[in-house]
Image: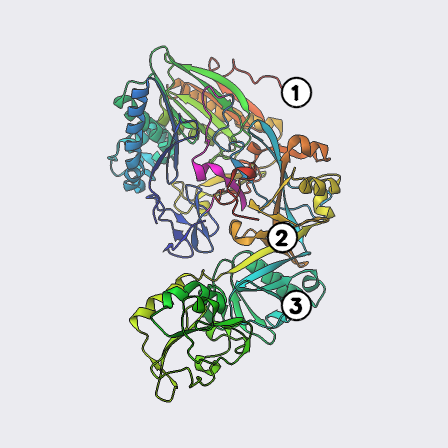
Amino acid sequence: MRDEPTARFLPDGKRLLLQHGPIDLVVQAFGNEAALRKAYAAAARRFNEVLAELCRELDLLRSQADRLCAMPQGPIARRMVEAVSPFARNIFITPMAAVAGAVAEDIIAVMIAAAPVNRAYVNNGGDIALYLCKAQSFKIGLVDRPDLPSLFGTTEIRAEDNVRGIATSGYLGRSFSRGIAEAVTVLAPTAAMADAAATVIANAVDLPGHPAIQRVPANSLQIDSDLGAIPVTRTVGHLTYDEIDGALARGLHQADLLQKQGLITAAALHLKGVSRTLGSSFLAAHRRPELA
Amino acid sequence: MNVTEPEAGADDKIRCDACPVMCYIKPGALGACDRYGNVDGSLVRVDPHVMLNRIIAKGGEVVPFAEAPEWNGGILTQGETFVTAIGAGTTYPDYKPAPFIVSAEVDGVDMVTVVTEGIFSYCGVKIKIDTDRFLGPETNAVRVEGETVGHVTTAEYGSQMLSLGGVKHLTGGSKKEGRVTCDTLLSLCNGKPVEMTIDGGERLIVQAGKPPIVNGLAEERMRVGCGSATIGIFAKQWEGKVDDVVVVDDHITGVLSEHQAGKYLGIPGTGIKIKGRRSTPGRYFQVAEPGTGWGGTNISDPLSILGPFDPKTARPGMRLLMVSTTGEHAAYYELDEALQPVQKNMPAALIEPVERIAENCEPALSSVLFVAGAGGSLRAGVTENPVRLTRSVKDALTYVTCGGAPVYVWPGGGITFMVDVTRLPANAFGYVPTPAIVAPLEFTLKLSDYKELGGHMDSVRPLSSLGGDATGSARLNLPHRQDNPWPFAPGGTPRSHG
């Protein structure tokens, strides 16, 4: 039995839901009716091939990015490799760290090529690719804990901003994290870059050897995880404020390096109710409204 | 829940073939998609704590974004996810608030679902076995592994009811009786087959939603009606193709030429004689003892119920069809010169009418209803004033579900409910060594009503908080069954239940 890719509209009739295997995309474009129809049709058509295309090169995409035996062929796979390569020299990272963002980016590119829409987003389980025509913007809600989604703040992404990708990574999310952050949200020039950078920064938020942190080999949870036997975080027990502050400082340092290299535009890091942000023009100005 | 044959991998892991990723999945783990898992070596569409997810079933609301007032991170959407009590845990002895009291906004009204796993020693199963075969005398004991776990109760239409479990077998007998009863209930509720014997009766294998197996033979069909009803239904289709028809049945055996339906068609008498107690013309009680032979009787040779043909009416060459009420047994005879019936091959013209009987018999199933009473302590987990919960349920302000499945709540005191075990997600039931059965139970009501009945308001958590848990405990998202009412809007679903 094999599940086929499906394309459906959500009950509001405006958002397209594309599902296949582990991929869930929510897609919305804004513009005139005819353009939207074309854009959605193109997205659904392209989506039919996406998973199969990725899986053909899955072994390659699951290997350490600076030791790839060949350059992958698929356009999404190439985006993935490109997005992780800046990190590959210093840490273990595989192209899979950017898969969600790369898929979102690819779908949005296909839509834009198919029809003139004003703006669009493709949300791949929290890793989001944006398209903004001149003078357009998106209002984005931010959460500090993916498991307890309350709005940490909102921000506006305008066409002139160097942001077309948003991604969130953390040990409470669907993929594994080597760090202890509940969520690291990154704004970056592309979705694949945001995805890879969020993974790297979330890994850096850490307290190595701390007894309250339970870690297990990734492949004990998922046999064919690209992380192999690398320990990933399962639970994080009590931490003192100084420890939380220290762990966040490591992450912030990593984020700062990436920002200086132009790999990310902004980042927000969350651990145990404490948040740190970088690129304050986007994030710090939008504080959570005071709630009783 | 779909179960497919997995491709065997090395060790005990399986390889999922639901999508091209082809994940290897260890027992108890999920694939990369979180939609398929390895459950005891089978690839199961899942989705430990089960949340019914209407999104998957109807392509519902998923991720509000951009201009929406809040972005929920794509974890859960209010009103589209119903948290079941399966795997929720319990706070027995229940003086604490239930493990999860979850709120969700549904159509602008704050709804609360109190989710708990009840520990039931006052519980059992009622089993309906579709069969006309005799299974055992009423009130006799039903045994598993030699222990009494229940008894034979009434015979109902085309079926025999059994009542198993109950507090007397669970805790009132020997330790072994309690353990075996608990195992039996748990297996039946989780849809597993159980072999049982009836004192003075037969050996059965019962599995919810599957045909009963009586003495090693699977029961295929329910009878279309008693012998008399069968004559009434099919008389016209036999007319002209045969001179007389006897429909053999444990309850009422019918004879076409004598039956009102035959008379109406002008079918002449054949001089046939049935051994048995005549009720009205063409209808006979007690032609034989009950058994596992023809039409639920103990006969294997149908001629044994016939007396000699009356020579004043019968003629050599007369054609006689004998058939059981399920069409499973049929034989064709012609009278010889001595007016003795001699079996011949079934004429082509009669094959279809016989098959028509079988076709009209519904598939025979064992159905299992779990019956339990939520006592005072369980209700205390829901509210500080337990009786108010009972009243709220009776007043239909509170909707009760069992693992998301609809229940029938008995009138009278307490909250005693019945649920069809096949409507729950797989392995929804558990046990404690007391012995007692652990069953999920959810109470859904308006937040305002919950407050009014003394609910544990401090423990109410938003639905969104259950998306993933810092404790690392897994939650399964299952598609909502379309034939179960959606617990937040039970009125909106066509009723296929009580």
Q: Amino acid at mark 2?
A: Val
The boundaries of the magenta stretch are B46-68
Q: In whole angstroms, how far apart are the C-alphas of marks 2 and 1?
A: 39 Å
Q: Is residue B378 above or below residue A84?
A: below
Numbered disc 2: secondary structure: strand
Numbered disc 3: secondary structure: helix
Numbered disc 1: secondary structure: loop
Q: In whole angstroms, how far apart are the C-alphas of marks 2 and 3?
A: 19 Å
Do callouts 3 and 1 mark residues in contact (Cβ within 8 Å)? no
Q: Closer to the N terminus: mark 2 or mark 3? A: 3
Residues packed near mark 2 inside 10 Å, few (<14), some (14 to 19) or many (20 plus): many
Residues at discs 2 and 1 both on one chain: no
Residues at discs 2 and 3 both on one chain: yes
Q: Which percent across, then down, holds residue A196?
A: 39, 29
Q: Is residue A282 above or below residue B224?
A: above
Task: Return the residue at label 2.
Answer: B438
Q: Quick one: B240 or B354, which is closer to the camera?
A: B240
Q: In whole angstroms, how far apart are the C-alphas of marks 3 and 1?
A: 57 Å
Q: Is residue A32 above or below residue B60?
A: above
Residue drawn at x 24%, y 37% is A70
Quarter holding residue B203: bottom right
Q: Which percent across, then down, holds residue B317?
A: 33, 82
Task: Return the residue at label 1.
Answer: A292
- Residue B226: say if magenta: no
- Residue B52: say if magenta: yes
Task: Return the residue at label 3.
Answer: B176
In the displayed structure image, the side of residue A124 where residue B108 appears, left or right:
right
Q: Quick one: A200 or B172, which is closer to the camera?
A: B172
Q: Tell me the subunit letter for badge 1.
A: A
